[in-house]
Every structure is written in structure tokens, then in C-alpha cells.
């Protein structure tokens, strides 16, 4: 006896080949109930259906249209029990999967298998019901049946089973089931893959790695396994290994999206030339793809901040809807790198509302500050503060820096102090205020702020060095200072400014030869003006005036306007 197909919803077994399977859970897709023509008599004549079954089907359909899926399921199950019709049974099974109701799914599947005991779709659903109900042996039996009957698309069917599970308990049962199946079929790659996927979802990455290695030993070059392996490596920040896995996958099956991901991974590893090579290949295949063009431009700028090709690409993209603001922003950065400040400001000011506007406006403020137009820089920062209240802490740091460069140290200190009333735990604000306190000669506040940072973050090397250096430079608490600086050096032994602090400590303690050794090392790493000045003073103290003068002359070439070096020049060179 046939029943009119009210709606046919079969379980979908077609999957996209990606690491996350690319399968929609049936539970994610609402059941669709369409209106049924009121032609009951015609239906009865065509199908010879009993009035009772017709009533149950129409009632179930109506319940479904109202979102009463449990009632709809009950109606279909009752109709299936009477009508013994496959389409009705399939309908009931689909709704049971959607509702994650393992008992009613099992009931529907029992009707299905009574009609056709060898139907793979029914066996598949019975496996799902068994896993959801914690019946491991039944699930294993059904999966083994599917393996024997349809080995060709077996891995796809397994993946659908896994994607149908939402409840943690069912996922745990599935994990046990598939590990048992590995014991029964140690040479079947699909079981290792599913276990690896479950481990990946459970963040058991080392186990996932091992399972995928076994799957790939059995089925070398399996694209699906390679893609999942790439995701597992990415989750552990093993970017080089992730890149290798994805490259192997793309070599087997060309996939533009995966190639783009490879390019991004290479960028994250600072392997810019390799990333550029991947993007060039993508450009050849899709010359009009703007997403690839913008990525290419950004990689070119990583290689050369003023790259001409990048600039031309950005000028082209500036005419394209959806790419204007990003292009304007990066054109501004190119102009800034070329020291074309006004052009850069014009580009930054062209950036409209959206992701890049805040960074563009801050860039304008920083450029104005760099150019020495401190009044305009201050006005710019305060304008941004009005429009971007969620960035208040970050902007307070920039505002205080502008005020500090204008030697308005008290105002800068007050800006930071007011910000701490709203954001008391912000280490950057505390550190900045400590530096401002030092300029105001308020060593007590400096010490309090830096010690508070160290209370929260004992291994903050920058704070340790700042406190140690200040105690050296502003007090005679040298032994205490030595402890802080040595702690900083233990964390970052090759940090030039930390080595400089250590050298300056020995200078203050009168140990000039030891001071010279450390300061020469610091100056060789980073020839900063202050480090140069410290080294010059030590050399003078050792009576090495000629050497001191040479270093001072060299430092002045790079730092003509430095006040500290200027003072030393008057002492040594203008005599």
C-alpha cells in the first residue's frame, strides 16, 4: 500500500571533503512542513489509504506546521504502525533525529527494518539511536553491517553518524564505540579518522595526532585526513607542521580556500616569500579575485613597506566597494613609511566608518606628534576619545605621551591618574604613570606603581628593570637595585636596555671596568643615545677620553637633537 508523499525528508549522506566534514547536523535544519491540499477523497481513491491513517497524517502535518514536532512525531509513528509504509517511516525517523529522541528513533527504525532489513539508511539511523541510548554493542553491530555492505562510501557514512550527535554523553559513547571498532579493524583508516576527529573536538590534540598518523599510514595522501591534521596542528600553534599537511592536501586536490589558508599560515610564520608564491599562483587562476589581491598587497608590504606593486594594487582596490577603507588605510601607511606625512594624513582621513577608522585616526595623531605639531596631535587624540569611549585607556597613553613631549609632565601624570580611577589594574597605565612620576621627581609614586605591577606580574622584566634603573639613577639603594636588574636579565639576558642598567649600576658603585664591559655589550646590541651617553661617561671616568669622544661623535650623527648627548658634547667636544 502506497501513501501520498506529504514531504520526503531523507537523511543526507553527501558530504564536502573538508576537515570538519562540512556536514550540517540534521538538528540544525528545521523540519519543513508544507500545506497539504484538502483533497482527502482524491487521496483515498489514489492510495486506498484508511481514513484513520489519513487523519493521523494530516494531524501530524498540522502539528509540524505549528512547530509541535513531538506531536508530529507521535502522529507519524502511529500512522507507520498501521500503514506499514516506508515513506511514513522515513518521515518519522527524520523528525526523531531532529529531536534527538533515541527511543522514538529506535521505534521508527524498527518499523523501517521490518519493511527492508538490508536498508543501509535504516542501519545508519539504528546506529545513531544505539549510540544516543548507550547501547555500544548494537551500534557496533550496525556499523559493521554498513562496512560489509557499502565499503566504498563507508567513511562518509561514519562522519554523518558523528555529526548527528550533540549530547556529550552520546559523543562519549561514540568515542568508546569507535575505539572498539579500531581493535576489530586495525587496518581501516576510517575508524582512526573518526577517533581523531572526536579527539580534536575534545581538544585531545596529541591523541588526535596519533590517530591521524595511523590513518595516513594506511591510506597515504588521504586529503580529508591531511586537512584534519592541519587543523589539529593549528590548534597547537604548530604552524610549520600545519602548513606541511595542508600543502600535501592541496598537492593531491587543488583547493583555492585551502591555498589561502596556507598563505595565511606562512604569513604567521613570517615566511613571506613563500606566502607570496602561493598567492601569485592563486592570482593566476583568479585574476579578478579582490580578496587575493588585498592579501597579495599586504604580503608585499611585509616584505617592503613601500612596495610599488602593493601600492598599485591598493590604488586599484580603492575603487572597489568593500575594499575602500582597507586600501585607504594601507595607502596611508605606505605614505607614512615614505615620510610623506601630509599624504599619509590625507589617506588616513579618507578612511570611513568601520574596522579601520580608529587605527587610521590614531595614526594621524601619531604622525602629528612625530612631526612636532603637538597642539594638533593633542586635539586629534581628544577628538578620538569623544568618539571611541571603549578605547579610553589606550588613548590616555597616547595623550600622556603627547603632553610629555610638550614637557607638560604634570598634565600627563593627571591624565594617567584619572584613567587609573576607571581602570585601576591596567599595567600599561601604571607603568606610564611611573615614568611620568620619575620626570616629576616623585620617586615614591614611581616605586609604588612599579611594585604594584610586580605584585600582579612578578616576571614583568620591563617593570623590574625600570624599578632597578630608577633606584640606581635616583637613589643610593644599589644592592636593592641590583636584585631587580638581575631578575630582569634572568628573563631577558640579551635585552640591551637591561644590560645598560646593569652597566650604569656598576658605574654608580665605582666599578668602572665592569661597567665598561656591560655598556659596550649593550651598545653593540642597540646603539641608543642613552646607552652611548652612559658608555661615554664610563670611558671618561677611566681616562679614555679619545675613545669617549669618538663614540660621542658617532652617536651625535644619529641623534643630533638628544639633550643628554648635547650636554656631553659641551663637556668634551666644545672645550
Image (cartoon, rainbow, N blue to C red):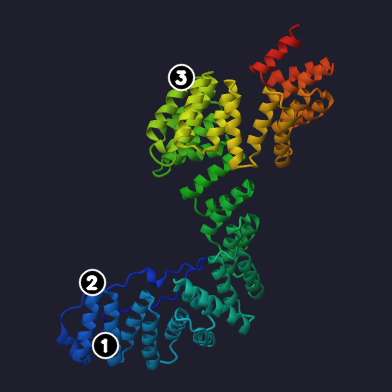
Query: Is 131 placed left or right of 178 in the picture?
Result: left
Q: Give the camera-side residue of 187 and 379.
A: 379
Q: Residue at x 61, y 55 (%)?
A: 237
Query: Is 46 placed left or right of 385 in the picture?
Result: left
| The C terminus sits in image quarter | top right
Percent x, y of residue 568: 72, 14
Kindly indicate whether the residue at mark 3 contacts the one at mark 1 (C-beta within 8 angstroms). no
- Residue 113 occupies quadrant: bottom left
Q: Would you name the residue on which mark 3 appears?
A: 375
State which mark lies toward you, 1 or 3. 3
| The N terminus sits in image quarter | bottom left
Q: Is residue 250 above or below residue 96?
A: above
**Residue 315: in sight, yes or no?**
no
User: N-terminal of the two: label 1 or label 3?
Assistant: 1
User: N-terminal of the two: label 3 or label 2?
Assistant: 2
User: N-terminal of the two: label 1 or label 2?
Assistant: 1
Q: Would you name the residue on which mark 2 appears?
A: 66
Percent x, y of residue 183: 63, 82
Kindly indicate whether the residue at mark 2 contacts the one at mark 1 (C-beta within 8 angstroms). no
Q: CA distance from mark 1 to mark 2?
A: 23 Å
In the rendering, which numbered label is found on residue 3? 1
Percent x, y of residue 172: 52, 74
- Residue 73 occupies quadrant: bottom left
Q: Residue furthest top?
A: 575
Q: CA distance from mark 3 to mark 2?
A: 65 Å
Amino acid at each position: 500500500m502506497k501513501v501520498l508523499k506529504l514531504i520526503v525528508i531523507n537523511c543526507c549522506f553527501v558530504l564536502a571533503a573538508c576537515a570538519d566534514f562540512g556536514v550540517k547536523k540534521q538538528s540544525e535544519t528545521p523540519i519543513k512542513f508544507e500545506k497539504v491540499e484538502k483533497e482527502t477523497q482524491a487521496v483515498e481513491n489514489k492510495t486506498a489509504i484508511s481514513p484513520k491513517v489519513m487523519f493521523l497524517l494530516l494531524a501530524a502535518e498540522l502539528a509540524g506546521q505549528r512547530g509541535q514536532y513531538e506531536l508530529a512525531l507521535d502522529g507519524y509513528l502511529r500512522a507507520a504502525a498501521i500503514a506499514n509504509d516506508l515513506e511514513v517511516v522515513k518521515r518519522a525517523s527524520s523528525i526523531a533525529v531532529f529531536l534527538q529522541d533515541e527511543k522514538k528513533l529506535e521505534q521508527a527504525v524498527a518499523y523501517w527494518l521490518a519493511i527492508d532489513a538490508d536498508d543501509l539508511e535504516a542501519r545508519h539511523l539504528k546506529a545513531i539511536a544505539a549510540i544516543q541510548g548507550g547501547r555500544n554493542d548494537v551500534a557496533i553491530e550496525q556499523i559493521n553491517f554498513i562496512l560489509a555492505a557499502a565499503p566504498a562510501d563507508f567513511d562518509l557514512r561514519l562522519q554523518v553518524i558523528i555529526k548527528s550527535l550533540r549530547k556529550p554523553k552520546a559523543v562519549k559513547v561514540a568515542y568508546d564505540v569507535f575505539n572498539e571498532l579500531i581493535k576489530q579493524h586495525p587496518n581501516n583508516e576510517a575508524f582512526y579518522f573518526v577517533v581523531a576527529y572526536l579527539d580534536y573536538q575534545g581538544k585531545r590534540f596529541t591523541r588526535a595526532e596519533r590517530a591521524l598518523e595511523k590513518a595516513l599510514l594506511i591510506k597515504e595522501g588521504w586529503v580529508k585526513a591531511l586537512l584534519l591534521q592541519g587543523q589539529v596542528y593549528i590548534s597547537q600553534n604548530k604552524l610549520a607542521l600545519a602548513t606541511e599537511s595542508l600543502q600535501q592536501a592541496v598537492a593531491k586536490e587543488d583547493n583555492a580556500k585551502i591555498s589561502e589558508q596556507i598563505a595565511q599560515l606562512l604569513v604567521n610564520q613570517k615566511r613571506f616569500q613563500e606566502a607570496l608564491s602561493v598567492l601569485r599562483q592563486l592570482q593566476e587562476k583568479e585574476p579578478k579575485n579582490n580578496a587575493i589581491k588585498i592579501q597579495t598587497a599586504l604580503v608585499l608590504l611585509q616584505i617592503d613597506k613601500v612596495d610599488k606593486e602593493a601600492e598599485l594594487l591598493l590604488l586599484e582596490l580603492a575603487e572597489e566597494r568593500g575594499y575602500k577603507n582597507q586600501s585607504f588605510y594601507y595607502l596611508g601607511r605606505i605614505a607614512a613609511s615614505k615620510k610623506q606625512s601630509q599624504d599619509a594624513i590625507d589617506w588616513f582621513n579618507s578612511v570611513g566608518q568601520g574596522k579601520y577608522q580608529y587605527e587610521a585616526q590614531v595614526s594621524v595623531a601619531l604622525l602629528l606628534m612625530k612631526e612636532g605639531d603637538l597642539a594638533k596631535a593633542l586635539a586629534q587624540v581628544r577628538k578620538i576619545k569623544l568618539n571611541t569611549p571603549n578605547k579610553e585607556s589606550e588613548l590616555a597613553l597616547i595623550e600622556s605621551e603627547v603632553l610629555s613631549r610638550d614637557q607638560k609632565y604634570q598634565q600627563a601624570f593627571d591624565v594617567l591618574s584619572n584613567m587609573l580611577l576607571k581602570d585601576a589594574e591596567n599595567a600599561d597605565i601604571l607603568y606610564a604613570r611611573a615614568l611620568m612620576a620619575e620626570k616629576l621627581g616623585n620617586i615614591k609614586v614611581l616605586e609604588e606603581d612599579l611594585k604594584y605591577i610586580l605584585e600582579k606580574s612578578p616576571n614583568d622584566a620591563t617593570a623590574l628593570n625600570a624599578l632597578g634603573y630608577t633606584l640606581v639613577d635616583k637613589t643610593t639603594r644599589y644592592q636593592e637595585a641590583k636584585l631587580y636588574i638581575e631578575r630582569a636579565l634572568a628573563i631577558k639576558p640579551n635585552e640591551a636596555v637591561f644590560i645598560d642598567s646593569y652597566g650604569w649600576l656598576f658605574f654608580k658603585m665605582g666599578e668602572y671596568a665592569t661597567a665598561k664591559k656591560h655598556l659596550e655589550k649593550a651598545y653593540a646590541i642597540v646603539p641608543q643615545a642613552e646607552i652611548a651617553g652612559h658608555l661615554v661617561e664610563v670611558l671618561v671616568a677611566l681616562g679614555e677620553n679619545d675613545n669617549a669622544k669618538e663614540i660621542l661623535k658617532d652617536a651625535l650623527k644619529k641623534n643630533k637633537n638628544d639633550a643628554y648627548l648635547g650636554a656631553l658634547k659641551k663637556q668634551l667636544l666644545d672645550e
